[in-house]
Amino acid sequence: MMTMAAEAKVWRSRLIASAILAVVVFGGLGAGLAVGLFGPAAQPTVQIGGPFTLTDQTGAKLSDTDLRGKPFTVFFGFTHCPEVCPTTLWEMSEALKALGPDADRLRVLFISVDPTRDTPEVLSRYMQSFDPRIVGLTGTEQEVEAAGKAYRAYWEKVPTADGDYTMNHTASIFMMDGTGRFVGTIAYEEQADARLAKLKRLIAGT
Amino acid sequence: MRSSIRDAARVAINTYPFSRLRSFGERIGIVAFTMMLLFAMSQSLWAHEFKAGDIEIVHPWSRATPDGAKVAAGYLTLKNDGSEGDRLVSVSGEIAGKTEVHEMAVDASGVMTMRPVEGGVEIPAGGTVELKPGGFHIMFMGLRQGVKEGEAFKGTLTFEKAGSIDVEFDVQAIGGAAGHDDHGG
């Protein structure tokens, strides 16, 4: 038989243990819920996106301020790209098709990280193989560099035989809202339905 | 005796009347089923194979390139039926000025990296190596012409031990074989 004081002590420690457990469990649940509900919105801890001025495949200038009012996606790539870039452009073409009329509420940008080879003429021809609503962008080395910096995109040249080169580059798609604010990314590995769901949310602004 | 046979036949016909097969829906069904069967059977014919010594080369394929593209990727599966390892040391394609084997990967930060495979792709004894989207691929560079869907092109694979063999690359659509998902073959 325990004394009253000892019993009270046991109960107090049980209470503290339960409180800690409750904080851990509900805190965890709450955090999980918050991530689930506000995942894309809660993501931007680093500044992604910013000012840029580039040239599209028709030779016209396009800058970030021209994009206000409509959400948009940005993908960095290059035309001497065997797999990731054509696949991504094809997948975005398919996504635009699947979005139907809603596709007009979205802009899709493809920024070349290889402006030396990807002139507006080269891009113009290349983009013909994809949805005509996708805008191909290039510019001077400095202009492209500035755009890459704004989006924290990474790329580098990788030499191949005979002095040629291929490139390593960020293969994620950046999703931006109508005010130019970063909403989230679509990874290269993502499945078509997940990609479409993200784009629909982006368009709906939720 | 004869009448009992006739009776049996009558019962059989009443149970499974031929007229059933004459209904429009039934005919459509039979035709559709036959076509599906033929289609399923023809799949194995399309998955073409080549053999150089102990190395089996299964279904070389490529994807159509966008307009004006200067590079294309090639994929295939290599099986080594022999008791010693071999290497795919070089590849050439009639469409390309030069060809290398590259290994592609996307890292945790979403950066796609590509690097030429030094010394060729090793195929261990009794092993299988897949060149497929998201991993090893043959990189055709300096394309002389665009690669078009359905227009197969010729190439040559050279192995360290098994020697050289001419193969043909089937060409699928851009984003063919379900985009970049694991549908290499």
Image (tube, coloured by chain):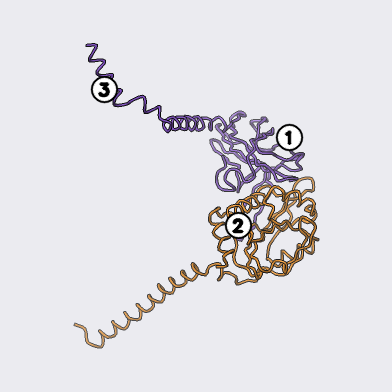
| Left/right of residue A5 with respect to residue A205 in the rendered view | left
- In which quadrant of the rendered view does residue A54 lie? bottom right
The colour one sees for chain A in the rendered image is orange
Q: Nearer the viewer, residue A173 or A170?
A: A173
Q: Quick one: label 1 or label 3, which is nearer the N terminus?
A: 3
Q: Amino acid at mark 3?
A: Val
Q: Nearer the viewer, residue B170 or B23?
A: B23
In the rendered image, residue B32, in percent from the top left (x then y), is placed at 47, 32
The residue tagged 1 is B94
Few, some or many residues within 10 Å of mark 2 (<14, 14–19, 20+): few
Compared to A21, does A87 lie above or below? above
Q: Amino acid at mark 2?
A: Pro
Q: How far apart in space, not on screen, are marks 1 and 3 (Cα)?
A: 67 Å
Q: Which mark is residue B106?
A: none
Q: Residue at x 59, y 63 (%)?
A: A203
Extreme residue in the left direction: A1
Q: Contact, CB < 8 Å: mark 1 with mark 2?
A: no
The residue tagged 3 is B11
Q: Residue at x 59, y 47 (%)?
A: B179
In the rendered image, residue B156, in percent from the top left (x then y), is placed at 69, 33
Q: Amino acid at mark 1?
A: Glu
Few, some or many residues within 10 Å of mark 3 (<14, 14–19, 20+): few
